[in-house]
Image (spheres, rainbow, N blue to C red):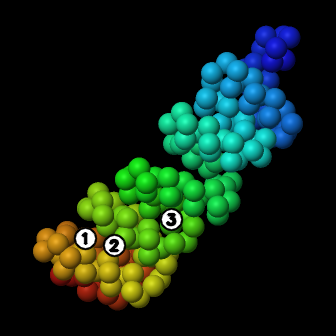
Amino acid sequence: LLEHLNNPQKAFAIVRKTRSVQSGAMVAKYCQKNNDIKGAIEFLLIAKQTSDAFDLAQQHHEVEAYAEFLGKDGTQEEYMALAQYFESRQDMARAGEFFAICKQYHKALKLFLQCGEKELDKAIGVVGVAKNEMLTHTLIDFLMGETDSVPKDPNYIFRLYMALRNYPQAAKTAIII
């Protein structure tokens, strides 16, 4: 289908549906030969050649595509490689997301807080999942302005208590707001 019938899209669809490792490798080679980097990354992942896919993604600045194709099917090591990659590129929000997937909540929270208010919802989510007192206090200090002398919107504290399922404290905060 790829070369002889000149119908690569049909071959792509079949491989996506069947998830065949061997066919994935053949389609990945075809994509590389035809300079379809995103396609090559996708099919290298199907072919279980994840390190080759990640290397290709880095070489061609397509790591976002790699992350998208990896989806929720990655391993701890693959997500950690993504976290470290994004951190090295100073993309703290994306790095934080992947550190959170790896259950490295302290690191994820630190990175989200470096982003300021625009990633506070993700920071709250991490603290809600981690249910760690130290992380909770770190986030509360940030929200109260202890770290930068700028108190944040009190709605964030309410959301934090809701994420922690601390409904009595959430209710008290709601009354104050």
Left or right of residue 85: residue 114: left
The local secondary structure at tag 3 comes to helix
Task: Kindly state the secondary structure of the residue where label 1 is placed.
Answer: helix
Give x and y (percent) for residue 153. Answer: 20, 69
Between the C-alphas of marks 3 and 2, the distance is 22 Å
Which residue lies most toward the top here?
5
Of mark 1 and mark 3, the one earlier in the sequence is 3
Asked if the residue under mark 2 is in contact with the one under mark 1, i.e. CB atoms within 8 Å, the reply is: yes
Residue 133 at x, y percent in the picture = 41, 88
Checking the image for residue 155, the label placed there is 1
Q: Quadrant of the C terminus?
A: bottom left
Residue 42 position within the rendered picture, expressed as x and y whole percent measured from the top left: 67, 37
Neighbours of disc 3 within 10 Å: few (<14), some (14-19), many (20+): many
Q: Nearer the viewer, residue 112 or 50?
A: 50
User: Is 150 in front, or is 78?
Assistant: 78
Q: Which residue is mark 2?
A: 159
At 78% across and 14% down in the image, what residue appears? Answer: 7
What residue does disc 3 label? 99
Which amino acid type is marked by label 3? Phe
